[in-house]
Image (cartoon, rainbow, N blue to C red):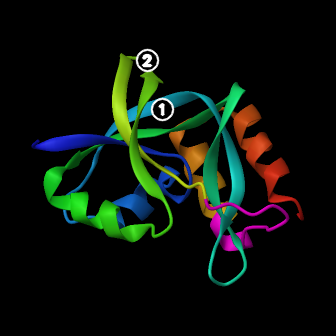
Amino acid sequence: MESFYYFGYASNLDVSTLQGRLQTKPILIGVGVLPHFGFRFNFPNPDGSARANIVSRENESVYGLVFEIKKEDLSYFLTSEPGYDFVEKEIFTKKGRLNALVFISTKTREGIFPKEAYWKVILKGGKESGIPDSYLAHIINRVGKI
């Protein structure tokens, strides 16, 4: 494996954030959609705030960005998100379907909310990357306390 596809749906929607975390510049493939999953702020951060997560939901979809990542950066992904599984899912893009790795956690808690700086990075990246405004409004509704 020389490279792999990664589907980012939270702070890594901000391309500059992802670039700052990796040794090699990721290649942006474009917007992707993960069907049958829903976006939530339900992963408990150690500080008591919430992080983004996706959960299985038949009638929902998650928008995100698909990147091609060099294998040299795989170790970053394997250690950067404790509590999440890094699993392969089928993503739909304008260029067709592809399999990409994505973070999903079963460790969830209801009634927790993200820090403002975190959800603002998600929205900034989503707007800059062409994620539909209607979907970004859905994320704002999940923040719970604007």
User: So how many labels did they put on this image?
Assistant: 2
In what quadrant of the picture does the N terminus appear?
top left
In x, y percent, where is residue 28? 34, 40
Q: Are marks 1 and 2 in contact (CB under 8 Å)?
A: yes
Q: Residues within 10 Å of mark 1 (few under 14, many from 20)?
A: many
Amino acid identity at mark 2: Lys
Vertical placement of residue 129 versus 11, above or below: above
**Image-quadrant location for residue 132:** top right
In x, y percent, where is residue 58? 69, 25
For disc 2, the marked residue is 94
In the image, farthest residue toward the left: 2
Q: CA distance from mark 1 to mark 2?
A: 8 Å
Q: Main secondary structure of the magenta part?
A: loop
The kind of secondary structure element at disc 2 is: loop
Vertical placement of residue 60 versus 124, above or below: above
For disc 1, the marked residue is 31
Vertical placement of residue 5 versus 18, above or below: above
- 109 inside magenta stretch: yes
Residue at left 21%, top 60%? Answer: 73
The kind of secondary structure element at disc 1 is: strand
**Which of the marked residues, 1 or 2, is nearer the chain's N terminus?**
1
